[in-house]
Amino acid sequence: MPKYIVTVDVITVHVVPVLANSPEAAEAEAGRIVAGDWETWFDHAEPVVVGDAQTETEYDSAAEVALRARMAANSPRVPVPARRPKPDAPTAKHRTTRTDHHADGSECPPAHKHTSSGKPRTEGCSGRAYSTAKCTCGWSTRSTVKTYVDETRKRHTSTEHG
């Protein structure tokens, strides 16, 4: 006995696989099954709408066609531009620099080396008293701890200009 698949209801709520001798017999059996469910579980005033009986192969191919149609209808259509778009105007590159300073406020040259605590390793240098970081956007910070200034500078650059 061949197997048929029958869709039942206006919006295809029920899909019923039925074993029957003919498509007509499959449609009648599916209608009987769903009508029994409706009387038991649902309060419907509308009569049962029975679709055409299809073999499994017919049902699968129809479902695939319907799926492709839905996907094509939902895909956004992007118009092809008539000419190439103009590139966006370049954005300003912000730069944040760190500088070390002596206790008297003068800038300590980058060639001067210090220990992690700021004591000088270069002769003639009074040592690093504090460090500052300034950005081209106007932001600045100052601390006696060089690593704090470096971390704050990196955080500013990544959050404000990243």
Image (tube, rainbow, N blue to C red):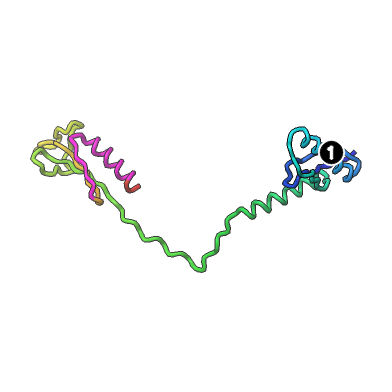
Q: Position of residue 22 (x, y in %)?
A: 90, 44
Instruction: Indicate left or right for 95 with 29 as reference.
Output: left
Q: Position of residue 154 (x, y in %)?
A: 30, 41
Q: Residue furthest top?
A: 117
Q: Residues within 10 Å of mark 1 (few under 14, many from 20)?
A: some
Q: How many marks?
A: 1
- Mark 1 = which residue? 32
Disc 1 residue type (three-letter): Arg
Q: Quadrant of residue 75?
A: bottom right
> In this orientation, which residue lies closer to the viewer: 117 or 57?
57
Q: Quadrant of residue 18?
A: top right
Instruction: Indicate left or right for 45 with 138 as reference.
Output: right
Q: Quadrant of residue 25?
A: top right
Q: Which residues are magenta?
A: 138-159
- Is residue 127 highlighted in magenta? no
Residue drawn 19% across the image and 43% down it:
99
Q: Position of residue 129 (x, y in %)?
A: 14, 36
